[in-house]
Amino acid sequence: MTLQIKTLEEYHNAYRRSIESPEAFWAEQASTFYWRQPWHTVLKNDFITPDIQWFMGGKLNITENCLDRHIAERGDQTAILWEANDPGSPSVTYTYRQLLAAVNQCANALKERGIGKGDRVCFYMPMVPEVAIAMLACARIGAIHSVVFAGFSANALAELIKDSACRMVICSDFNARGSKNTPVKSVVDEAISLGCDSVESVLVLKTGEEKVAFNPALDIWWHDAVAHQPDTCTAEIMDAEDMLFILYTSGSTGKPKGVVHTCGGYMVYTCFSFRNVFQYRDGDVFWCTADVGWITGHSYSLYGPLLSGAITLFFEGTPTFPDSGRFWQVIEKHKVTQFYTAPTAIRALMASGHDEPDKYDLSSLKVIGSVGEPINEEAWHWYENKVGRGKAPIVDTWWQTETGGILITPLPHITDTKPCFASYPLPGVQPCLVDPAGNEIHENGIEGLLCLKFPWPSILRTTYGDHERCRLNYFAAFEGKYFTGDGCRRDEDGRYRIIGRVDDVINVSGHRIGTAEVENAINQHSVVVESAVVGYPHDIKGQGIYAYVITQHPVTDEEHFRNEVLMVVTKEIGAIAKPDKIQIVSGLPKTRSGKIMRRILRKIACGESDGLGDISTLLNPEIVDELKSGVLV
Ligand code: WTA
């Protein structure tokens, strides 16, 4: 197993070594895995092109490291512990041995359908054990999974299937979450009908008795395809830099981009970060509440824990079903030791059940984590007091889809914690702050743009099908640095506090939403001429979506119009991108060159219209008063 830091001194030593000789440091970590062939060169570091490669020439299969490697020592130990949406359903467990067999069976089924190395497979699944099984089955045979969060619409799903020309889609019939049981197969059917010609088969998991439309030319039931397969399957030997998966995420411009992670570096870093950030010890029960449709689910529900031989809890449901004690009930039931969730869930639970955690035995908890968005001070203290109870420290972990794993975080019981601070970089991570001109800021007690100066093993390698977009997005803003898109503060002692996105990305309940995507969706409405979308502070979601919309003609029934706009956005992207507020306006503030002044729109939406600054350079300064007087509070 990779190094597990246990003391502050060990952290300082590891950090120093990782900076002085990164290649030796990471080679040491990598050597603790099972490789089919060792690497010849540890690192190719080109932050300009960019061309980043780790463990070059190394051959491996990540599933042999997640599964086979553990059989001798912990074959009968639980690997996945599954808790259903319905609290009355029994929990399901897979031991490492059972999981390996299930993965092999699924892998054989995929092979039978013609899926092999390099093929892309799209997932549109609920949080059930089969999603983990099928992702690992892909990895087993060298196929590339592209998991799409099952809340995205058919239109959005179709775009992503087409972008990476997926040959197969794996889905369920229904998705049970909270009191709803959403038909998801029908969303896949609709997506495929939108011109997804690359799809040759759809593997459908049956979760209930209700019938769904079934097209025998394309569809195949999971139980028909998988159950009879042999439970052994030789792992495909992969190059360290072969693609492991694609995960789409929103940026400030255009459509979502497919972030690409590769086998070797991702394996080393997710295991290393998991073991250190959560201080996982044998027998602990780790629970990350993220859906596997997001990077957090990939790295810390699935790969990080399994690579470490851990017990990982998968939860199908929601924090508030059947009531706001559900998380605490699951922690009590399974004696969860590490709990990892998002500030939006913490805020929602704090609002709906302030003293609810008191009713449960949470004494098993050793570490509690936060991820996905800035956590506000009130939520931080509530989480620490009510859930951590002075015993389990908070790890406020900062990272991104593109970073593959956690980069900045406290280490529990090792480094100190400070409300709202992600604190210190993990070994191998070299953060820096730059000013808008790109000059590195060396002093402390200052704010700047967060960059990384040196690659770590799980940094993204490219954006699928468009390497230039990867360069422009992350490596072109500041030469020789990876730019995160986040603004950040560094305190006098060198701790980092993430402030939030400085680009046109809104973080809604920890989900990244590109303003351009929402605008494009709104503009599909037949009477909309133009729209502009900005974020504003929202008590529960962190940020809400505020849309300014220009219509062709005055709308008589505003409520009806707003509902139509919400429907269009739901259809184009999904319910998670629905604007919270829609202000109908006659114009948008523009510069003389026709550029929308988002800064002004943001200030007005945030209720800060007194501090708009100089607006005299606008093409249409008179519009500002109209926007201010109509602002929705
Ligand atoms: C934000 C999620 C503050 C940040 C793992 C980042 C955070 C974006 C934190 C990435 C945190 C993530 N504190 N902000 N602890 N963690 N963020 O790709 O703006 O879904 O750039 O990855 O979430 O979101 P993503």
Image (cartoon, helix red, strand yellow):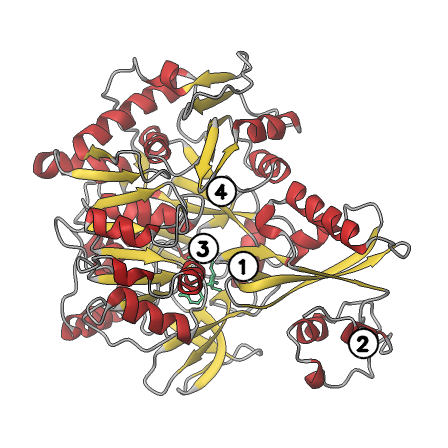
**Residue that mark 3 sits on:** 402
Instruction: Tell me the tag on residue 624.
Output: 2
Up-down relation of residue 605 to residue 176 (above or below): below
Up-down relation of residue 471 to residue 247 (above or below): below
Instruction: Tell me the tag on residue 149.
Output: 4
Q: Is residue 577 left or right of residue 56?
A: right
Of the numbered discs 2 and 4, the one sitting upstream in the chain is 4
Instruction: Tell me the tag on residue 355.
Output: none
Q: Gap in Å between the C-alphas at discs 1 and 2?
A: 26 Å
Q: Gap in Å between the C-alphas at discs 4 and 1?
A: 15 Å
**Residue that mark 1 sits on:** 508
Secondary structure state at the residue bearing disc 1 = strand
Q: Gap in Å between the C-alphas at discs 3 and 1?
A: 18 Å
Q: In this view of the protein, can residue 36 be seen by the observer?
A: no
**Which x, y percent locates residue 334?**
21, 47
Residue type (three-letter) at the residue carrying disc 3: Glu
Of the numbered discs 1 and 2, the one sitting upstream in the chain is 1
Secondary structure state at the residue bearing disc 4 = loop
Q: In this view of the protein, can residue 126 be seen by the observer?
A: yes
Rendered residue at 25%/52% (across/down): 331
Residue type (three-letter) at the residue carrying disc 1: Val
**Which x, y percent locates residue 403?**
41, 57
Up-down relation of residue 59 to residue 390 (above or below): above
Q: In which quadrant of the rendered view does residue 309 lie?
A: top left
Furthest-left residue in this view: 73
Secondary structure state at the residue bearing disc 2 = helix
Q: Gap in Å between the C-alphas at discs 2 and 4?
A: 38 Å
Of the numbered discs 3 and 4, the one sitting upstream in the chain is 4
